[in-house]
Image (tube, rainbow, N blue to C red):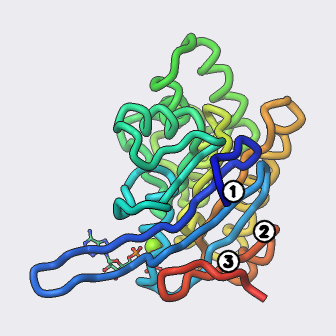
Amino acid sequence: MNGTNNNFALQAEEIHKTYKLPKATLRILCGASLTVAPGEHVAITGKSGSGKSTLLNILGGLDKPDSRPGTRVAIKGRKITCASERLRSQVRARDVGFVFQAYNLMPEMNIVENVMLPSLALPGNSRDSRARALHLLELAGLADRLSHLPKELSGGEQQRVAIARAMMNSPALILADEPTGNLDPATGNQILDMLFGISKQEDSEGHGAPALVMVTHSTDIAGRCDRIVRLEDGRLVEDE
Ligand SMILES: Nc1ncnc2c1ncn2[C@@H]1O[C@H](COP(=O)(O)OP(=O)(O)OP(=O)(O)O)[C@@H](O)[C@H]1O
Ligand SMILES: [Mg+2]
């Protein structure tokens, strides 16, 4: 594929990642490529240690791939490989929402403050941000928990806050690394209902539903996505 294309939420081509250790070189990613359409949901599966989290961090600009000709990551047509740290953090703030297995909420902030956090990176007034955070928390079914600190919530509730936070800036792309990994299967499915439901709602409000790239070990959860790809020997292959 040549040239960056605005019509894709994500274009990642020829991603390599090598860790040089004192006595060995670990080749984790060896030419992984992935293209995701706006609003498309893609599951990434693969063995433990195969490099799924490494890849997700590179796709979201949290980590850098090896520098090679032909390597490219572009989000909504904006190339982040080789970009300055400033541009990468701009794209991250505006266009990417992250959801992690361990929730990663700020322990000393209540849930409204947690959800509002990404908005601080963008211009805009705090009253609008607060209204949006309250709206997202309502969609998350947490309207009666607004003054709670993360530790005063269950795991599933904390993950719903994390999803609301990921949606705060209406990103084009949500990257989720085993978002249901710490939850029982029924709660995991509820989390996914919320994630899919909230993005539908975004669509009806004209923001455009975000694309989702989700790492998961669960075949049930993967089966709810439009497409499943497997990370194997450092490359992504389409699941049959
Ligand atoms: N900073 C680092 N330095 C050296 N090796 C690393 C580093 N980060 C990750 N690795 C190695 O890269 C490999 C891939 O790690 P990664 O966390 O991406 O795997 P994963 O597919 O997400 O696994 P899991 O399913 O267990 O979460 C592992 O073997 C890990 O030891
Ligand atoms: Mg991982």
Does the Cβ of the disc 1 residue fall within 8 Å of ligand 2? no
N-term mark: 1 or 3: 1
Residues at circles 1 and 2 in contact by the CB criterion of under 8 Å? yes
Residue identified by numbered label 2: 225
Does the Cβ of the disc 3 residue fall within 8 Å of ligand 1? no
Determine the image quadrant of residue 88.
top left
> Rounded to the nearest whole Å, what is the CA distance between mark 3 and mark 2?
10 Å
Question: Mark 1 is on which residue type?
Answer: Leu
Which label is found at residue 50? none
Residues at circles 3 and 2 in contact by the CB criterion of under 8 Å? no
Q: Is residue 81 left or right of residue 140?
A: left
Question: Mark 2 is on which residue type?
Answer: Cys
Please indicate, yes or no, whether residue 60 appears anywhere in the rendered image: yes
Residue identified by numbered label 3: 229
Q: Residue at x 42, y 36 (%)?
A: 89
Q: Residue at x 68, y 71 (%)?
A: 43
